[in-house]
Amino acid sequence: MTSQLYKANTRGTADFGWLQANFSFSFGNYFNPERVQFGMLRVLNDDTIAAGAGFGTHGHANMEIITIPLEGGLMHKDSMGNEGVIRFGEVQVMSAGSGVEHSEMNASKTERAKTLQLWVFPDTEEVTPRYDQKSFDLEQHKNTFVNVVSPKNHNDGNALWVHQKTFFNLGIFDENRTINYPIQIPNNGVYLFLIEGEIEINNQILTARDAIGITATTAIDIKINSTAKILLIEVPMQQ
């Protein structure tokens, strides 16, 4: 196993007043040649959006975009005709494909919203744009990973799917236990982002908002030191 720890305070940051952003990978005005991507994972932005504010209409192409609200909700509107609110407990996927425009606004006029947005390079370009969202009950499946995104041909019908051999897993775990995650597709890597709590992997301690990139293994053991909320992303390391 090869692993690299990324502490939360080493991420890129931006403060636009209405938006406080943390960038795990180079994005916008933040550029770090050592943190451009992890395999096919290109973006992991940890955003806090002020009440009544948000991202106006903008375009994307040839990217799989996954949005995970952590607090509050986002009003989504796109050029495919989709319009609605995505809230905590839900996950949204959008295949930008041949091109799509959308906006993302805080659904509340009084409360902030916190979201994670991730971009993954697709394995097929210029696909017809598509959108989907789904609710997942992590509390009901406590102490196990819930697969929320997977490849179309590895999908059991419970998870959302994208055009890439990637698996997104969310989980809430009680302290003093060890969780084993087996790699689903040989040679894939894992990028684990700790949303809350404290865990230990490969003799390295992670606290809230830390991440670790792992390659060259067939399984990962995660020791839960304190109640933890985890996002685990399995992703191809090359196309």
Image: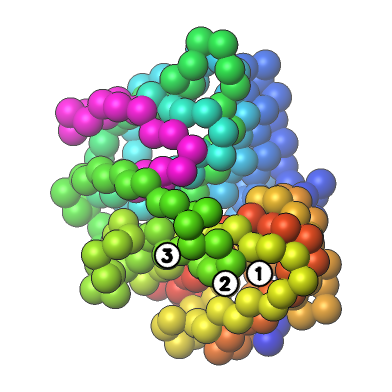
Which mark sits nearer the N-terminus, 2 or 3? Answer: 3
Which mark sits nearer the N-terminus, 1 or 3? Answer: 3
The stretch in magenta equals 76-94
Kind of residue at badge 2: Val
Residue 10 position in % (x across, y down): 80, 49
Q: CA distance from mark 1 to mark 3?
A: 19 Å
Which residue corresponds to the image point at 24% horizontal and 73% vertical from the top-left? Answer: 153
Kind of residue at badge 1: Gly
Residue 69 position in % (x across, y down): 50, 38
Q: Is residue 37 above or below residue 22?
A: below
Q: Are marks 1 and 2 in contact (CB under 8 Å)?
A: yes
The residue that disc 1 covers is: 213
Secondary structure type for disc 2: strand
Residue 221 position in % (x across, y down): 67, 81
The residue that disc 3 covers is: 147
Q: Nearer the viewer, residue 100 or 118?
A: 118
Which residue corresponds to the image point at 66% horizontal and 51% vertical from the top-left? Answer: 195
> Is 152 colored magenta in this rendering?
no
Kind of residue at badge 3: Asn
Crowdedness near tag 1: few (<14), some (14–19) or many (≥20) residues, C-alpha within 10 Å: some
Q: Are marks 2 and 3 in contact (CB under 8 Å)?
A: no
Q: Is residue 74 above or below residue 91?
A: above
Residue 140 in the figure: left or right of residue 143: left
The residue that disc 2 covers is: 190
